[in-house]
Image: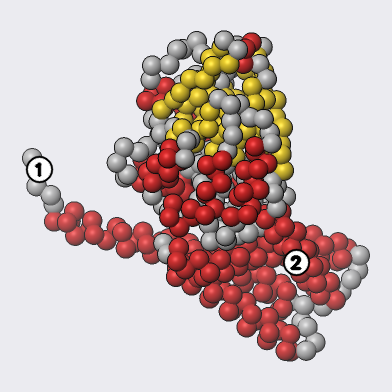
Amino acid sequence: MTTPQATDVVQAPRRRPLRIVAISAIVASILALLFVYPWWSLFIRPDWPPTAVTVFGTVLFAALLITLPASMVLSHGHTDRDPIRMVGDALLGVIWVVFVWTLLGEILRLGLLVGGVEDPLRSRIVAVAALIVSAVLLIWGYREAMRLPRIKHVDVTIPRLGAGMDKLRVVAITDTHFGPINREKWSARVIAAVNELDADIVAHVGDIADGTVEQRLGQATPLASVEARLARVYVTGNHEYFHEAQEWLDYMTSIGWDALHNRHLVVTKGGDNLVIAGVDDATALGSKLDGHGANFDMALAGTDPDLPILMLAHQPKQVTQSASAGVDLQLAGHTHGGQIWPFNLLVKLDQPSVHGLTRHGDRTQLYTSRGTGFWGPPFRVFAPSEITVLTLHSA
């Protein structure tokens, strides 16, 4: 056994503070970019005639810059402070939309420059246009986030699916994110819509809520009345691992759902069988929660290798393991389709699919839902929510 060197003893405790400093610097830089650029483009560059306009804009952006991180810090881990969190979530969405459309205003600026429009009129036109577009998109995006999701129909051919399983209907909901905005009526409407879809299987593919069962019970209660002929199945998403994942698994089991915690079940229709398996979210292992962590081998242990497999795994990037395990179709969520355009471009850097049906290898297909609810900012811009009806066809 070797003796630790003195340098090891001295350096180890410094790593965490340095990491915190680095993360804080990155967050501060992002916030500065999100706020400073729109402030300069909307209130400084246009050189508004009344000085009061510039002063007002400066005070407003300074106040928002302080309020956003303060609300996030004050509400973190405290669901009894939901009103504070709602303020932070809304501000995050607002500043993202304003930043994006102020930045895109540079295209209009270039066009006006080519057209011979001089400053400061050019900058004033761009600023007003950016504010109008942002306001319209935020109002529309809020309505999109709060509305009943659209029903999306998808046909999927699975060559190994038996003829008796042909036209099996799988209804998928995901990313309901029951949270600080009380959406009990919305939840009831979603379940009523699901029950009208004549489902053989209903799947909830994770991120059920932001909070514990006790805190979000009112919004989650309608899940107990979901109707399906063969099975109701559920897997955890990454947000469950912020708020008592095992508690949510136990709750879903208590209301009659099959919680697929690295396990499977087999359903039969028309004399043919289908394996429905589920794994924990990709972040589960890092949560250090005892017995949690995506385990495809455990989930599929003892299955007939000739049977088709429907896999529930919250994140699209888990499709790599699904393909290695010989899965025929994986259902995923997580991405929200980007939720607020053009955030989908950033999501694409982390996930192989942002939305829709994709193929991975010779056998495996992946369907990524845009999600049924929303997370954080109560806006959806060019990324509509959905309840998905997947009709499975045999070859």
Q: Residue furthest right?
A: 115
Percent from the top left, x then y, of residue 68? Answer: 54, 70
Look at 60% across and 50% down and name the residue there: 187
Which quadrant of the figure contains the N terminus? top left
Percent from the top left, x then y, of residue 247? Answer: 38, 46
- The residue at which mark 2 appears reads as 135
Residue 170 or 68: which is nearer the viewer? 170
Percent from the top left, x then y, of residue 232? Answer: 53, 32
The quadrant holding residue 391 is: top right
Dot 1 amino acid type:
Thr
Drawn side of residue 175 relative to residue 280, left or right: right
Look at 54% across and 43% down and name the residue there: 223
The CA distance from mark 1 to mark 2 is 64 Å
Residue 353 or 19: which is nearer the viewer? 353
Dot 2 amino acid type:
Ala
Q: Residue furthest front?
A: 225
Residue 190 or 137: which is nearer the viewer? 190
Look at 67% across and 30% down and name the residue there: 198
Drawn side of residue 12 relative to residue 379, left or right: left
Percent from the top left, x then y, of residue 196? Answer: 69, 36
- Circle 2: is it few (<14), some (14-19), or many (20+) Cα within 10 Å? some
Scheme of colours in the image: secondary structure
- The residue at which mark 1 appears reads as 2
Q: Is residue 191 visible?
A: yes
Look at 68% across and 74% down and name the residue there: 40
Residue 355 or 243: which is nearer the viewer? 243
Q: Is residue 358 visible?
A: no
- Circle 1: is it few (<14), some (14-19), or many (20+) Cα within 10 Å? few
Mark 1 or 2: the one toward you: 2
Secondary structure state at the residue bearing disc 1: loop
